[in-house]
Amino acid sequence: MLVALAAVLGIAFVIAPRILAASGPGDSFGDESDLREAFRTAFVEYWRSGESGFSPSLQRIIDYWFRYHAAKAVIAAILLIVLVVLSILLWKVFLKASGLGVGMRFGLASAGILATTFALLSLMMAMANIQGAVAPFASLLPMLTGGATDGELADTLNQVKHRLADSPSAGGRTPPALDVMITDFSRYHVAMAVVAAIVAIVLVVMSVVLWKRFADTVQSDRRTRCVLASFGVLSALLSLIVIAVVVANTTNAADPVPGLSALFDGGW
């Protein structure tokens, strides 16, 4: 049942968000290329307006992108819970499989590793989509630089890059649209820093608990000690990686202009 539910959620993660995001009138986009073209056109219009408030066409796209990422985040979170439960059950069965043959034990271990891997992927997808839902405008910005850029868009991007290069040091007036971009880009990294910090704490606690259980397990129970040690090492290593993500995103949130400049230069 859990495997079937995970499969359904995996399919829903790919199909459902686009359907759910298109809940408003006129908020449907054929595919990503249609969304990219619509966003590029709306962005040029927004930049040239000289206003900080989003134009109706841009707001419509941002609202769509928020719903899209929110749907993906919810589905990924549910999928994560299902896969964690499935992983725990598989590893418990593996630890109690002393009376089974080598082939069956190998199959259970392989299934446990696969479920754990997919759980980690679901965690990454949930984190990324929470970030996108918190700052949908910033998460749309990479669409401006991917693919061919010419005409009005190329001129607009050149103006943005020029303003970003002058912004912190020139002391002049920053265009309202650029202020909004900088603020939302900072929020984008704050969101990931907060989410990653929570995940890091969970991983550290998990590592401590696993190593404590490892120490309390009798040495004759080699299979249990091996599983506990493996997950203890994995959670410790993952916590270090996630802590690095926290530091990187905190740095970008504190000083978002270099990262935003790199984005518009195509280096993000």
Image: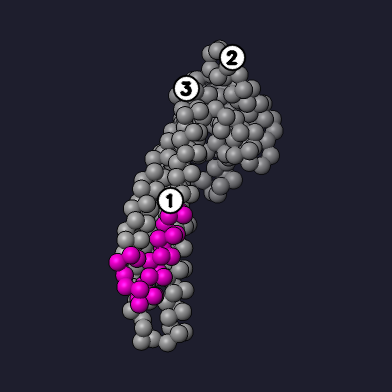
* Label 1 secondary element: helix
Q: Position of residue 75 (x, y in %)?
A: 39, 55
Visible residue check, residue 16: no
Q: State the quadrant of the N terminus.
A: bottom left
Q: How is the image coloured?
A: one colour
Gap between marks 2 and 3 measured at Cα: 20 Å
Q: Residue at x 35, y 76 (%)?
A: 221
- Can residue 93 be found in the magenta stretch? no
* Label 2 secondary element: helix
Image: 112 above or below 166: below
Dot placed on the residue nearer the N-terminal end, 1 or 3: 3
Q: Residue at x 47, y 74 (%)?
A: 110
Q: Residue furthest front?
A: 219
The type of residue carrying mark 2 is Ala
Gap between marks 2 and 1 measured at Cα: 40 Å
Dot placed on the residue nearer the N-terminal end, 2 or 3: 3
* Label 3 secondary element: loop
Dot placed on the residue nearer the N-terminal end, 2 or 1: 2
Of tags 2 and 3, which is closer to the observer? 2
The residue carrying pointer 2 sits among few (fewer than 14), some (14 to 19) or many (20 or more) residues within 10 Å by Cα, namely few
Q: Residue at x 46, y 35 (%)?
A: 250
Camera-side residue: 216 or 75?
216
In the image, the segment drawn in magenta is: 214-238
Numbered circle sitting on residue 52: 3
Question: Disc 2 designates what residue?
Answer: 170
Q: State the quadrant of the C terminus.
A: top right
The residue carrying pointer 3 sits among few (fewer than 14), some (14 to 19) or many (20 or more) residues within 10 Å by Cα, namely some
The type of residue carrying mark 1 is Ser
Numbered circle sitting on residue 239: 1
